[in-house]
Amino acid sequence: MQKRFFYGWAIVTGGFLFTFSYGVFYALTVFFDAIQKEFNWSSTLISSIHSLHLLTFIPAGIVMSWLVEKYNPRLMLGISSLVVGAGISLLSRVHSIEQFYLFYALATIGTGGMWAPPIAIAQRWFIQKRGLALGIITAGVGAGTLVHAPLANLLISSFGWRQAYIIEGGITFLLLAAGALLMVSSPAEKGLKPLGAEAGTSEAHMENQAATWTLGEAAKTLTLNAISLVYFFTVLPMHLLAVHFVPFAMEAGISKASAAAAWGVMGGVGILGRVGMGSLGQKMGWKQALAFCCGMCALISVWLVFTTKLWMLYVFALVYGFFFGGKVPQVMGLLGSCFGTRSLAPLIAYAHSLSLIGGAAGPVLAGFIHDQTGNYHIAIWASVTSWVLAASITYFVVKPPLKLQHIKKHKTGQVA
């Protein structure tokens, strides 16, 4: 008999706390002006901090995903929480770009457990309502941005940017530690089955027919690499904005506080996009929903080129936030539907790692363009192009052939 409270929702809560905490890294755009004034660093140099973060995240995500799969997830994610909190707090002590790189990289090492592991674990707990679960977990990033951007602005104006980083580090550690305590690797460890595993449901039948690919096997397929390339072209423009959104708005004559609030609104609307499109994506098809969200982000990015008023910035934030948020669970759901949940954490980490190369390039590209031209117009058109490429490549993503799936089942003694 299924208990009234299904523990999978506790997993979702823990995953939400992890992705929510990542919002502290999207707050660099709010710290940008204060750091630049104190050190007189160029836009390119400050942008490189975020790019280093993303490049460090690549090995951190892969290693942490492997550790969480191999050992107790609560222990591994608890250690991750401590490292992130310490790294963020130590940013208050920097006096050179090298120190900033060092402490930001330290915090990043801990973030390896903040994305792929909780998303992968959650998919093992849900067959039915998987889209909703993924939407809620990935909505944490939007909620984190909604809270951390105005919070950082308030802390900086009240205590200075150094003290702000100490407070942010403490908050981040507490949230991550709470999320780690809720993590359980699979329903079997609690004597449960995934939600919707009852015989006869269409979702359960599809799950039983899904392949269970290892990372090594999946990495050889066009499917995984095409999804990773789509992911690459969606992450590049988002991380470009993560660093340059507030400076762009200020150059358009919008106050820093208003720009930070708009950035927060974008993250908040992203919550609705992730939850709403997460549920819709499972019904209409992960691939179709992903292409639609990418296309809408391309269209509204054109609007940003001509934005000169606060109301125009808010229109952009509302539309872009919803559809960027909406595309996130589609990528995760598409990976799970194509490759199963056996090695899903490493698979997500693999695709995410490749995408972060684009994320690392975006901020530096925009910073370099700004230093050379004095504005962000060319950088925004580059974002438009990136979204168009993402939408186009999505149509070439095809599920691995069923024939290969059946061969794999026969080799493991299962009935095809």
Image: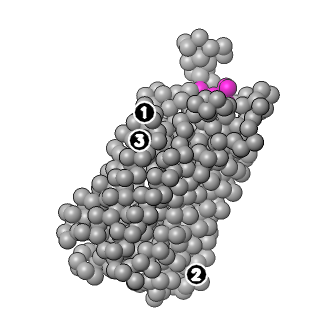
What residue would you read off at disc 2?
A: 312
In this rendering, the label closer to the viewer, 3 or 2: 3
- Cβ–Cβ below 8 Å for labels 1 and 2? no
Note whether 246 is above or below 53 in the view shown: below
Answer yes or no: is residue 59 visible. yes
Depth check, front residue: 17 or 224: 17
Q: Quadrant of residue 359?
A: bottom left
Between the C-alphas of marks 1 and 3, the distance is 7 Å
Q: Residue at x 64, y 42 (%)?
A: 8
What residue would you read off at disc 3?
A: 76
Q: Quadrant of residue 121?
A: top right
Q: Is residue 254 left or right of residue 404?
A: left
Q: Is residue 301 left or right of residue 349?
A: right
What residue would you read off at disc 1?
A: 71
In this rendering, the label closer to the viewer, 1 or 2: 1
Note whether 82 is above or below 319 in the view shown: above
Is 209 part of what is drawn in magenta?
A: yes
Q: For the residue labelled by badge 1, is the local secondary structure a helix, a strand or a loop?
A: loop
Q: What is the image's colouring?
A: one colour
Where is residue 130 drawn, in percent x and y?
66, 43
Note whether 197 is above or below 175 in the view shown: above
Q: Main secondary structure of the magenta part?
A: helix
Q: Is residue 98 left or right of residue 229?
A: left
Badge 2 amino acid: Met
Q: For the residue labelled by badge 2, is the local secondary structure a helix, a strand or a loop?
A: helix
Task: Using the image, tell me which numbered label, if any, was put on residue 347.
Answer: none
- Cβ–Cβ below 8 Å for labels 1 and 3? yes
Q: Residues within 10 Å of mark 3 (few under 14, many from 20)?
A: some
Depth check, front residue: 32 or 160: 160
Give the mark, 1 or 3, whose residue is nearer the N terminus.
Answer: 1
Q: Magenta segment, which residues?
A: 207-211
